[in-house]
Image (cartoon, rainbow, N blue to C red):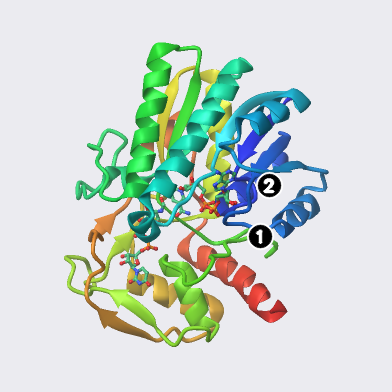
Amino acid sequence: MKKILVTGGLGYIGSHTVVELYEAGYETVIIDNLVNSRIDALDKLKELTKKDITCYIGDCRDKELLRKIFKENEISGAIHFAGLKAVGESTTIPIDYYDNNIGSTIALLEVMKENNVKRIVFSSSATVYGTSQEVPLKETTSLGATNPYGRTKLFIEYILKDLYKSDNEWEIAILRYFNPVGAHKSGLIGERPNGTPNNLVPYIAEVAAGIRPFLRVWGNDYDTKDGTGVRDYIHVSDLANGHVLAIKQLDKVHGLLIYNLGTGIGYSVLDVVKAFEKASNMKVPYKIFDRRPGDIAVCYADPTKAKEEMGFVASRGIDEMMEDHWRFQKNLYIKK
Ligand code: NAD
Ligand code: WQD
C-alpha cells in the first residue's frame, strides 16, 4: 500500500493526524527533526495505531534525506506540518522562520516533483486573514499577515497557488486552522510546549496545575460580550480528521482547494477559563492586563465550505476540548 508522507508527524497536530489516518485505513511515513517534539511520541503512535510506523529523524530541508525517503517508500502524497509556529518568536528570529517554513516547503515540493508525486495538503492558518474583522472569516476574505510567522504561511499559500497555475496536475489542499486545543482521548498524545506557553489553553493548564500562579488575560476592553478576546477553538482530533477528509476530497476533485477548519463558534477568554475549571475541577486564577500587541478582538471561521464540500464537521464541544486537554496535561505533571 502506498503511504502518505507526514512531515512534522511527531508534533501536536501531525501526531493526531497520523492516528486519524490509520483509523481511516491509510499508512504513513513520518519525517521530523524533533525541533519541537520528542521521540517518545513515536512510541505512543505505535501503541495507539498498533502499527510499526516508519519515521525518519531529520530535517525536511534536507533534499537528500527526502530523496532517500521517496526511494525507500512508495509515497502517494504528503501532508506538510513541519514548521516553526510561535508568532512572538518569529519576530525575534525571522530568518529562522523563513528558512525553516519556506525552505522545507520548497525542498519537499522539489523532491515530490522529481518523483512525480503531486499531491500535498498544507497546514495553513487563520493568521493569513491578518487583522480582518469581517467575521465569520470565509475563504474569500482578503488576506494579509502581520508577523513573520504569518507571512511564511501566506507566502507558502502563494507558492502553492503559483505551482498549481504552472502545472495543474498538482492536487493541493490548503487548510486554514483556527485555534487547535485538546488532546487524543487516550491521554497518550497532546501538545507539549517548550518553555512558557504563548497560547491560551496550554497556559491555563499550567495555572491549573500550579506551575504558574495566574493567567494574564490580555485585555478586557474589546467589543465582545465580556470584553476579552474571542476565538474559534477546535479539538485537535476534529482538526486531524479534516486532513483525512481533505485527502479523500483530492481523490474526487483534482485541483487546488482551500478550506477553513474551525467550528464556527467563538468563545471568549473567560468562557475558556470557566470551561477549563469545570473540566479539571481546579481553580484558574487570573488577572487582567493590557491588550497583547497584534491581537484582534474576534476571530472565528465560517466553516460552511468544508462542511458542504467535504463533509467536515467539528463535533467536539468546548467542554470535551478542555477535558481532553487536561487529561493529557495532568498525566504529564503526575509523571514528572
Ligand atoms: P508542532 O511544533 O507541535 O509540530 C511541528 C513539527 O514539525 C514538530 O514535531 C517539529 O519538530 C517538526 N519540524 C519543524 N521544523 C521541521 C523541519 N524543518 N524538518 C522536520 N521537522 C520539523 O506544531 P503543530 O501545532 O502541530 O503545528 C503543525 C503545523 O500547523 C505547523 O505548520 C503550524 O504552523 C500549523 N498551524 C498550527 C496552529 C496551532 O495553533 N498549533 C495553528 C495554525 C497552523
Ligand atoms: C487566544 C486568546 C489572547 C494567552 C495564535 C496564533 C495563530 C495560530 C493560533 C498558528 C487571545 C488570549 C492568550 C494568555 C490571554 N497559530 N490570551 N492570555 O492569538 O488567537 O492565535 O495561535 O498558526 O497564528 O496567532 O491564540 O491562544 O495565543 O490567544 O489572555 O496567556 O487568548 O489575547 O484573545 P491566537 P492564543
Label 2, residues with CA under 10 Å away: few <14, some 14-19, many ≥20? many
**Mark 1: which secondary structure?**
loop
Distance between the alpha carbons at the discs numbered 1 and 2: 10 Å
Question: Is residue 141 in view?
Answer: yes
Q: Is mark 1 within 8 Å of ligand 1?
A: no
Asked if residue 90 is positioned above or below residue 61 in the image, the reply reads below
Where residue 129 sits, quadrant-wise, is: top left
Question: Is residue 1 in view?
Answer: no
**Mark 2: which secondary structure?**
helix
In the rendered image, residue 303, in percent from the top left (x then y), is placed at: 38, 42
Where residue 227 sits, quadrant-wise, is: bottom left
Q: Is disc 1 in contact with disc 2, using a CB cutoff of under 8 Å?
A: yes
**Which residue is drawn at the image coordinates 58% and 54% (left, top)?**
35
**Which residue is drawn at the image coordinates 60% and 52% (left, top)?**
11
Residue 225, label in figure: none
In the rendered image, residue 315, in percent from the top left (x then y), is placed at: 51, 51
Q: Which residue is mark 1?
A: 189
Where residue 336 sits, quadrant-wise, is: bottom right
Q: Which residue is mark 2?
A: 19
Kindly identify the amino acid type of the residue bearing the numbered disc 2.
Answer: Val
